[in-house]
Amino acid sequence: MDFKQIEAFINVAKYKSFSKAAEATFLSQPTISSHISSLEKELKVMLFDRNGKDIRLTEAGKLFYEYAINLVNIRDNAISSLSLYDNRICGKITIAASTTPCRFLLPQIIESFSKLYSEVNYDIKEGSTQYVVDQLISFNVDLGIVGDMIDDCKLTYTNIFQDKLVLISNFDNLNEKVDFKDIIKLPFIQREDGSATRHIFEKKLYEIGFNIEDLNTIINANSLEMVIQLVKNKIGVSIVSYYACKDLIEANLLRCHTIEGLDIIRPIYLVYHNKKTLSPASRAFIEHIKNINFVK
């Protein structure tokens, strides 16, 4: 048994496909199949049930999967520990971030961190908070930055920033301060399920005796950029992070409104998997974030 076989097994289990596992690891499908076959012969058990393209772990496969993950983590931990003898912080950090921190906070962090450690490069993935959490739990990324906390005992969260959600519009007849009852009459553009902004807004509505169904939602949009463009074109109003559209507000391309009795402040979190072995570069990145003063 060698690590190539174990890694092939983990990837086939993750992608539920020999071809996708081969594509993800830049190997041929016959090579992946050979690794799995050799591993099954050595362990004297079938690890996968194969029914055409449908690939599923057997009960033995499910049992071995936990050991396989631990074996790879132990190897990575050994390599990482040995690298501590070298004072150079280098290599790649893979980061998943939800929309607002990805576009507003992460560029500031990388700019200041790169001045200290110029040999570090980055792989950035943007998605919803749920996407970020899924990537962390699947060990696909090193670190996450999100606008909401999805509880999971495998994850560690650290509050790094306080974000402010505001109502934006491009309507000339809407006052700077508005009552929530007035918003109900307006066409509303909503973020998709899984969005931290939507989740936080829904919780605040519940606290004041309303719910999301009370709004006149005309569009559900799956990106912040789409929301902003729709609002700019006077299609409707929406709730977004102030810092994500601060430049547009200051340039008078969008109008910012406060809602009477509804002050929405949310934390932005740094999050990582408790069981994932972090590289020295990732650990240095975490410490840097904890000490940075963000420009608002």
Image (cartoon, rainbow, N blue to C red):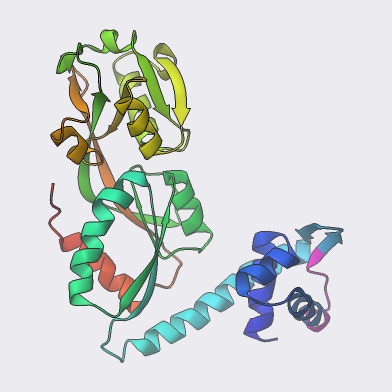
The magenta span reads 41-48
Q: Is residue 241 above or below residue 55?
A: above
Comparing 256 with 131, the one in front is 256
Q: Quadrant of residue 163?
A: top left
Residue at (12% x, 56% y) in the render = 293
Residue at (75% x, 73% y) in the render = 29
Q: Is residue 230 above or below residue 153?
A: above
Could you say where residue 280 lies in the image, as x and y percent from the top left? 32, 78
User: Left or right: where does residue 117 sit relative to residue 32?
Assistant: left
Q: Is residue 275 above or below residue 240?
A: below
Q: Quadrant of the N terminus?
A: bottom right
Residue at (58% x, 71% y) in the render = 69
Residue at (32% x, 81% y) in the render = 90
Could you say where residue 232 lies in the image, as x and y percent from the top left? 30, 28
Could you say where residue 122 lies in the image, as x and y percent from the top left? 36, 68
Comparing 185 with 200, the one in front is 185
